[in-house]
Amino acid sequence: MVFATGEGDKWFGRNRAKLDSFDPASDLPLKLVELFSLRPRATMEVGAANGFRLWAIHERYGSRVVAVERSESAIADGRSRFPKIQFVNALANAIPLSVSFDLVILNAVFHWIGRANLLRSIAEIDRLLIDGGFLIIGDFAPSRATRVPYHHRLQQDVYTYKQNYADLFLASALYQSVAFLLSDHANKGALVADTSDHDRWGVWLLRKTLEGNYVDARHVP
C-alpha cells in the first residue's frame, strides 16, 4: 500500500489547506449520521487524516472517537488540534485495537488498499464493529471493477481500485443496506441524480446484523 511508504504524508501535505476549510454541513458521511439519528457512542474512522470529521462527531454527539491513520504528519497535526481524539498509526489490514465501535467510517479509503490486503482489511473492520452497529463507506461506485494508474506515481506501476465496496459487505449476509447517496468525485458534498461512470461516487450506510438477514428454514414453505 502506497500510504505505508510515504504517500500518506504527501497526500496530507497536498490536501491540508482543503481540510482546514472542512464544512461539516456539506459532508455526506455526517449527513447520513444526522439523517438517521445515529448518535454514536464510539466512532472509529479509518484513514481519518488529522481527525477533522471525527472532531465534528465528537462535538455533536460526545462520541468517543478513534482515528486510524498512517500519515505521521496528519497524526501530529491532529493531536495538536483535537486533543479528544485517540490516534492510532496503522493500516486498515492490521488495526491494533481490541475495543468495539458502534460506528465505523471509511471515506475515500478502500480504493487505496492493495488487493492482497483487501479482504484482511474488511475482516478488521468487521471485527471492530459491534452487532447492530453502522458502517459508512464513501468511495468510487463504477458499474464494473476498474483499476486506475495513480497519477502521482505513474512511473511505479501503482494503481487505485474502483468498485462497489458496499457489495462486499452485503454479500456476506451480515450487513443490511440502510441508505445510499450518489455524488461525484469532483464534488463529494453535492448530491446528483447521475454522473459519469468514471466519476461516480457513492456513500453507503450499512447496518451490521449477524442474524437479521437469515430466514429460519423451519418457517420457509
Image (cartoon, rainbow, N blue to C red):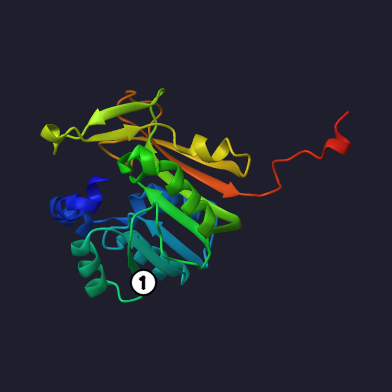
Compare residues 43 and 172 and report the one nearer the observer.
172
Q: Image quadrant for the C terminus?
A: top right
Horizontal side of residue 178 vs 77, given as left or right: right
Q: How many marks?
A: 1
The kind of residue on which mark 1 rests is: Gln
The residue that mark 1 highlights is: 86
Q: Position of residue 86 (x, y in %)?
A: 36, 71
User: Secondary structure under badge 1?
Assistant: strand
Q: Farthest residue in the left direction?
A: 155
Horizontal side of residue 206 vs 66, given as left or right: right
Q: Residue at x 45, y 42 (%)?
A: 119
Q: Position of residue 100 (x, y in %)?
A: 53, 65
In which image quadrant can residue 175 be found? top right
Horizontal side of residue 184 vs 125, given as left or right: left
Does 58 appear above or below 212?
Answer: below
Q: Residue at x 20, y 68 (%)?
A: 77
Label 1 Cα neighbours within 10 Å, binned few <14 / some 14-19 / many ≥20: some
Q: Position of residue 209 (x, y in %)?
A: 64, 49
